[in-house]
């Protein structure tokens, strides 16, 4: 009997340790996911454009296909790659993170640039596609999954950099997987709500028994275009801010302490002048200058990408993939 009690006590101890590990993994995943806010917001803002031109009945199935592709990207490709990186080449994490930050700065700055200098659509498929709807759906899903892969790579790299490197590889794998799933559910759950909100508003406006209900429905329909614009603005600002912050912190870790220390010093001086809201002021000033840096850096990257990087890529890829 005493042996059985000892065994049960050991099992209870193991269960407590396992529960603690699960809590730690969830905590690490949540904290790391918050670091990827800029890329996550951009992912949610970008995806709805792939649903334009389809019947309302196909919108949710398409979102589901893209979400499934995103899960495959994160768990089957990016998660093993991240773990290999952490195990065998941790010194590459900061440069890769800075490369992803540079991509965010470039994408955000390009959107700002085209606000002031609109450009004609590219000749690579931005025109309206015609043909079999099922084939068009496959093309749109494939394009969205490719875009998601780029953003997911940035998200997973940010999460990996935010994790506690002293933990075991299994702990890191669990935190990465959980964070990836949480982010995917949040992003594509939000996308599903966004793309169906106008349909819900139309339904309320048509079948609502009360005038208030019908008014709310019409209000939702009118509000959605403005919401999409706000999402695009917030997504662009978040990209520039997060991208600039990543590059600045990366430079600091690589031994180039400016402008990181300059921004930190300005933020602290400003926060001292507003002691009642010192924490918020410190964060706001830091984010502001990170964003200014990210915008300037991104604008510098635009001609480099156009004149150097794109021609190199086009010379390497087959002509049909340009």
Image (spheres, rainbow, N blue to C red):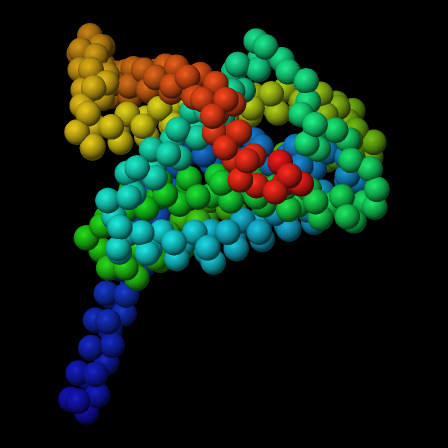
- Picture quadrant of residue 114: top right
In the picture, measured across the screen, residue 34 lies left or right of residue 228, that is left
- Picture quadrant of residue 272: top left
Residue at 58% of width from left, 48% of height from top? 67
Q: Position of residue 295 (x, y in %)?
A: 41, 17
- Asked whether the viewer can see residue 90, the reply is yes
Q: Position of residue 16 (x, y in %)?
A: 25, 66
Q: Closest to the observer: 185 or 288?
A: 288
Residue at 28% of width from left, 25% of height from top? 248
Q: Closest to the observer: 3 or 298?
A: 298
Residue 175 drawn above or below residue 110 = below
- Residue positioned most to the bottom: 1
Q: Closest to the observer: 193 or 47?
A: 47
Residue at 51% of width from left, 44% of height from top? 149
Q: Closest to the observer: 64 or 249?
A: 249
Residue 287 drawn above or below residue 159 = above
Q: Position of residue 252 (x, y in %)?
A: 21, 28
- Asked whether the viewer can see residue 210, the reply is no
Residue 252 drawn above or below residue 86 = above
Which quadrant, please, contains the N terminus? bottom left
In the picture, measured across the screen, residue 153 lies left or right of residue 119, that is left
């Amino acid at each position: 009997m005493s042996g059985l009690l000892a065994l049960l006590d050991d099992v209870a101890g193991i269960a407590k340790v396992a529960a603690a590990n699960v809590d730690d993994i969830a905590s690490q995943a949540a904290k790391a996911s918050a670091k990827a806010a800029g890329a996550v917001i951009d992912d949610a803002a970008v995806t709805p454009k792939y649903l334009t031109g389809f019947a309302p009945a196909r919108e949710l199935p398409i979102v589901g296909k893209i979400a499934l592709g995103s899960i495959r990207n994160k768990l089957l490709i990016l998660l093993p790659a991240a773990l290999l990186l952490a195990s065998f080449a941790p010194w590459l994490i900061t440069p890769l993170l800075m490369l992803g930050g540079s991509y965010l700065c470039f994408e955000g700055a390009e959107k700002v640039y085209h606000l002031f200098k609109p450009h004609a659509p590219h000749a690579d498929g931005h025109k309206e596609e015609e043909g079999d709807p099922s084939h068009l759906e496959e093309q749109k899903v494939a394009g969205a999954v490719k875009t998601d892969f780029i953003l997911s790579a940035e998200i997973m790299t940010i999460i990996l950099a935010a994790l506690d490197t002293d933990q075991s590889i299994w702990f890191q794998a669990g935190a990465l997987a959980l964070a990836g799933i949480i982010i995917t559910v949040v992003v594509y759950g939000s996308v599903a709500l966004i793309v169906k909100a106008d349909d819900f508003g139309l339904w309320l406006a048509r079948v609502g028994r009360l005038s208030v209900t019908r008014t709310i429905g019409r209000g939702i329909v009118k509000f959605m275009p403005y919401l999409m614009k706000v999402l695009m603005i917030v997504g662009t600002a978040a990209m520039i801010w997060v991208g600039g912050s990543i590059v600045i912190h990366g430079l600091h870790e690589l031994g180039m302490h400016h402008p990181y220390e300059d921004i930190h010093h300005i933020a602290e001086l400003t926060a001292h002048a507003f002691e009642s809201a010192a924490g918020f002021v410190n964060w706001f000033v830091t984010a502001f200058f990170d964003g200014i840096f990210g915008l300037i850096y991104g604008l510098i990257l635009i001609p480099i990408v156009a004149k150097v990087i794109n021609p190199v890529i086009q010379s390497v890829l087959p002509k049909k993939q340009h």
